Image (tube, grey):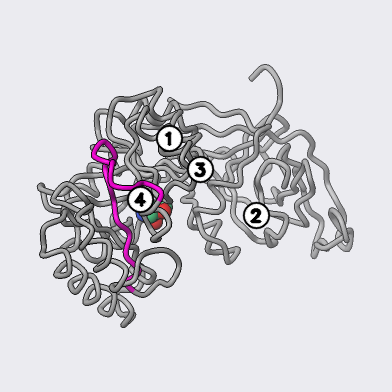
Amino acid sequence: MTTFSAELIVDSSKIISNISRLKSLISSESKFMFIVKSNAYGHGLKEIVRKLESYVDAFGVVRMEEAILVRKATNKPILLMQGIYTDHEIKVAKENKIQIVIHNMNQFKLIGTNNSELGLWIKINTGMNRLGLSQEELKVAYEKGIINSNSVLMTHMACADDPDDPMNKMQINNFEKVFNIVERKTKRSICNSACLINFPELSFDWVRSGIAAYGGEFKNLNLKTAMTFRAPIISIRNIRKGERVGYGGRKKASKDMRIATVYAGYADGIPQTTIDGTKVLVNDKQAEIFGRVSMDLVSIDVTNLPKVAENDLVSFWSEELPINEFSNKNGLISYELMTRITKRVKVKVT
Ligand SMILES: *Cc1c(COP(=O)(O)O)cnc(C)c1O
């Protein structure tokens, strides 16, 4: 390492093996859209698209700028999942062969009837009440003749991570109704990661998977966290029983201790609210966060690791310490940890 910094090491071979595991769960007829919104969930958009291109059938994003970046890296289909809002964006979508999601009636007006180049995905509200046409709106749109057998009818599940939640059944039933409204002519897409894991029978024509491919949601599938977020130790000191560490002196030593200060803080993406006792790895051994996370630094307890020295690397999450350990301990979700890593962190994608 030439200059000291927090680093993000992304191993794309882990994403490839996670995706192959996920594909083994679904019908071989179903196509796999890899969701790379928000800078590939923090993993580095351009590099990830290049490395994953031959393993997936399409890429999904939510911002036009990202769609264009993906188009520069691949010829695969691209879906702009939260639609378009201006004439200019429609023009750009057509020029770049970007498929779009229509989730409200204004967008239908915007695209008009001359839309044969646009691959159309029609999003239906089946109960999540966030985006999507109602059944009545879909009827109106279908009667206008814009929706055809190339269109994809899609919806999003609110509770697929909990198979017992009655909302799942309700959404599945509602989707069946809307599929009848279009005379069962369109293609279908329901599943995000949690849905394809818990309801693989709903994989239909397309699954749209992000978090599981990155290894941030694994259940018993043995999916691997593809990113290692780590930083070096820049200082070590011994403290006496009763001394306090960090802002607010939040953590007080219950005995004589050895404390290492690590070169990463909330300005790198470690949540400021991280609690004491959150596990990290130093030289493959477990240690715990000790005291409040500051902007650039965080302290860990290495009392039981006498060999740990300055320059040793501390991982906050990695294949060996799954990101869910950190997120669950702190009442967060892995998606948020992945996407909050900041610009000053050095990213290396292999
Ligand atoms: C983000 C997103 C997904 C992927 O969700 P994961 O839980 O990460 O698999 C799928 N569909 C839509 C519309 C999304 O916005």
* Residue, disc 2: 288
Tell me if residue 165 is in the magenta stretch: no
Q: Is residue 196 visible?
A: no
Q: Is residue 122 visible?
A: yes
Amino acid at dot 3: Ser
SS of the residue under disc 1: helix
Where is residue 183? Give x, y as percent.
11, 65
Residue range (magenta): 110-126
The reply to whether the residue tagged 2 has its Cβ within 8 angstroms of ligand 1 is: no
In this rendering, position of residue 119 left or right of residue 323 = left
* Residue, disc 4: 101
SS of the residue under disc 4: strand
- Name the N-terminal-most of marks 3 and 1: 3
* Residue, disc 1: 67
SS of the residue under disc 3: helix
The residue nearer to you, when weighing 132 against 234, is 132
* Residue, disc 3: 38
SS of the residue under disc 2: strand
- Distance from label 2 to label 1 (Cα)? 40 Å
Amino acid at dot 2: Glu
- Name the N-terminal-most of marks 2 and 1: 1
Tell me if residue 120 is in the magenta stretch: yes
- Name the N-terminal-most of marks 3 and 2: 3
Residue depicted at 16% across the width and 64% down the height = 182
Could you tell me which quadrant the C terminus lies in?
Answer: top left
- Distance from label 1 to label 4 (Cα)? 13 Å
Near mark 3 (Cα within 10 A), the count class, few <14, some 14-19 or many ≥20, is some
Residue depicted at 60% across the width and 37% down the height = 230
- Distance from label 2 to label 4 (Cα)? 44 Å
- Distance from label 3 to label 1 (Cα)? 11 Å
